[in-house]
Each structure stands twice: as C-alpha cells, then as structure tokens.
Amino acid sequence: MNAGSQRVRRSGLALLAVLSLALASCSSRAAKQLRQTVPGTRAPAFVTQVAIRGEYLDATLEGETFRLRFFFRPSELCAQLLRENTWVDYRSLGQWGRVQVEDEEFCEPVGIASLPEWRNRQPRSSGRGVKPRGTARFEIFYTDDEIVLARGRFPLATRVGWPRWDDTVAIFPNTDACREPLERGVAPIEFRHHGPRPLELVSAQGPCPVLGFAIPTPTPRENSS
C-alpha cells in the first residue's frame, strides 16, 4: 500500500471514529429524553429545597437529566416523603408525575413551577414570531419574602400545559417589578415561545415572570372574599 492510500485510510478511520462518538452521544441524549417522557418511568431524584407556602408545600427535585419544582398539599405523607437532602423516586405517571419511595405510598403534585420545561413539552405553535397576549385578573392571598400567590384568571396558562386558566393560582416572585401589577390585580400577560420566562405580566417597572401554577384550595377563596 502506497503512502497516499495509507493517508486516505487513516483519514477514513478517523472520520469513522468521530461519527461513532457523535452517534453514541446522540443516542445517549435520546435515551435520557425517552426515559423522561415514557409513562411510568422511574428516576431517582434528590430533594434540594422544601418550604411551606401557605396551603402548599414547595419542593425542588433534581435528577440526572432534570430539575423540577413542584407544589404539593402539605399532608403528613408529603411532608414525610419530601424532606430536604433526601432521595426519592420520581415517576412519570399522571399529569405531572408523582413522588414515592420503594413502591410505597405516593405524593402527587398539585402545582408546577419550572415552566420552561413544561412549555417545551407542548406542541410547537407555528406563530413563533408573535407574542400572544391577554389580560390577567386576580387577587393576592399569600405573600412571603420570596413569592406571592394570587388566584384568578390567567389567560395563556394552557400554553405551558396547565389544564385551566379561568380559576387557578399563579405563583410570582416577590420583587419590585411584580409589586405594582400584583397590587393592582389586573395586568397584561404575555407568552414567549423561547427563553427562561414563558409567561410574564407586563408593567412599567419591568417584566414580572409567572413562576408556576397550582390548583386552588378552599382557603384562598375564603380569604379573598
């Protein structure tokens, strides 16, 4: 074999090796994505943060390929399962999954944050260049140093996979930009197809992102009357 043929052969082998690595990487990513979407799939998750927010238990779960923040009812079972710095099983069952340990009793979310993750699981709209807009109307019923909870009508909530918009709880950060529109109880709301803030209230002080949504409880309705 002459020198030219050897160079061609070495180049071909090098290209084959690069293609093999690329295919292996794509296969690995595809497998991870498949594990997240196949119903019933179980994934170990580390509970990194837990806080009581009025009638909700706010918990963040981190797995190998995901970081998801959920809101739960603060029941005895959920409080027992969802403790900071512990491992649980996150299973992709139901609408938003469930948390359990060793196939025992489980705790299901009643609210979601991590809205970019849920938005990206929805079918893509053809009008990506347009920012859909509506008018949100609501009343605050809970505030702490970090978040504000408001109940009301939030058009476009279904764009991130939330099942209803006409009577729901929205979660906001307790920031200066959010203070004015939240206290007013009415504000334009916009949806974005890309970026870290799928939904946000529009105000003169700047964008006020919607962090998530939760199913209402009887208490907020009683407090807001």
Image: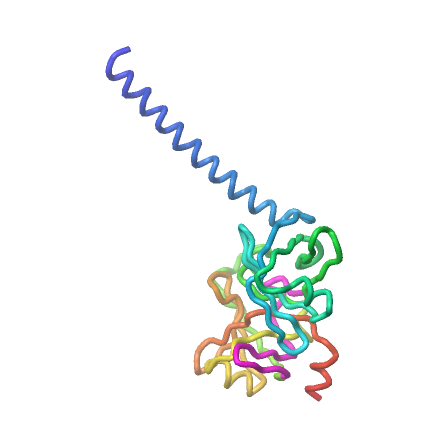
Residue visible at 55% across and 57% down in the picture: 62
Q: Position of residue 7 (x, y in %)?
A: 27, 21
Figure check: 176 above or below 59:
below
Figure check: 42 above or below 209:
above
Q: Position of residue 220 (x, y in %)?
A: 69, 81
Residue visible at 72% across and 76% down in the picture: 217
- Out of 125 and 62, give the one closest to the viewer: 62
Q: Position of residue 123 (x, y in %)?
A: 59, 55
Count the labels in the image: 0
- Out of 124 and 118, give the one closest to the viewer: 118
Tell whether 137 sits left or right of 25.
right
Residue visible at 69% across and 58% down in the picture: 95
Magenta run includes residue 11: no
Q: Position of residue 97 (x, y in %)?
A: 67, 57
Figure check: 112 above or below 188:
above
Residues shaded magenta: 141-163
Quarter in which the C terminus is drawn: bottom right
Tell whether 144 sits left or right of 94.
left
Residue 167 visible, this orientation: yes
Residue that protrudes farthest toward the top in the picture:
1
Quarter in which the N terminus is drawn: top left
- Out of 47 and 177, give the one closest to the viewer: 47
Residue visible at 65% across and 47% down in the picture: 38
Magenta run includes residue 146: yes
Figure check: 83 above or below 35:
below
Residue that protrudes farthest toward the left in the picture:
3
Coloured how? rainbow
Tell whether 76 sits left or right of 61.
right
